[in-house]
Amino acid sequence: MKKTIISAVLLVVASILVAIGVAEISFPESFLTFTDQDWLIDIWPKAYRYNIHVGLAAIIIATGICFPAYRLQKDFAIRALETLFRVGIGGMFIFASIYKIQDPHQFAVLVAQYQFFPALHLESVNNFFALLYPQFEFWFGLAMIVTPFVRESAFAIFWMFVSFIIALTWALGNDLGITCGCFELEDGDAHDKAEAWTSLIRDLILIWPTLWLATRKNHSLIKVWRNK
């Protein structure tokens, strides 16, 4: 029991660090970030420039913390990590889909800014993609959490991450100053490339736990804890 408690505490700390890391990388000025806090900027005016460094450091430390948690109580750690990854990644995809489903026209504008489909002579696919893709995000994200089909859901989300990475790499390679359009629908005007870089880093990090989930057995979150 003592080992389980210590393992649980370590995983809670790791989860908080991951949340802070992802927020620092992709969601500056959110309640989880601190590099943009006034008190820190008063002390160190350039602190906000290091949000990606802080975010990556937090995720690396969190990964390191998971190892002793795993060694202390292997079975508990695996169950906890599966639960956290399913709820976290599934919830993120549900959240990401809501704005796009509510305003497909604006999402179509954001998709068009990547200039990917015209390069493949598939201009007509743009609007269809903008309508269909958010539905995939919502339903596979929901399935990740509430259904036993974790492998199928994770496999689908893995390939969505691959598509995000390809699109962002394309945008950066073609020097497109764009807004990602991942979690909010902003205007389609040109931006600097910082957001594309932060989104790419985030996706390159999150694709790995998604791939791990694709190797897990199919069972509901309740059975994750009931099965021996």
Image (cartoon, grey):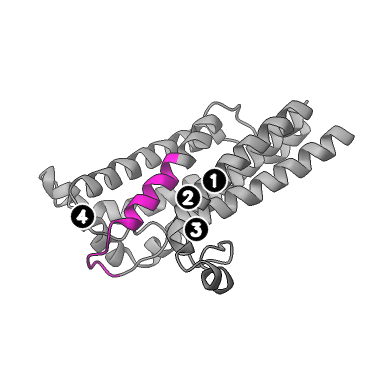
What is the spatial separation of the Cα atoms under label 3 and label 4, in whole angstroms? 26 Å
Pick whichever of labels 3 and 4 is earlier in the sequence: 3
Pick whichever of labels 1 and 3 is earlier in the sequence: 1
- Amino acid type, callout 3: Phe
Q: Which residue is mark 4?
A: 176
Q: Note whether 123 is above or below 35 in the view shown.
A: above
- Amino acid type, callout 4: Leu
Disc 3 secondary structure class: helix
Horizontally, is 222 left or right of 185 in the view? right
* Labelled pair 1, 2 in contact (Cβ < 8 Å): yes
Residue 227 visible, this angle:
no
Q: Which residue is mark 1?
A: 57
Of labels 2 and 4, the one closer to you: 2
Q: Residue at x 51, y 51 (%)?
A: 55
The residue lying furthest to the front in this view is 43
Residue 184 visible, this angle:
yes
Q: Is residue 169 magenta?
A: no
Assess disc 2: are there few (<14), some (14-19) or many (≥20) residues with their C-alpha within 10 Å of its C-alpha.
few
Assess disc 3: are there few (<14), some (14-19) or many (≥20) residues with their C-alpha within 10 Å of its C-alpha.
some
Q: Which residue is mark 3?
A: 95
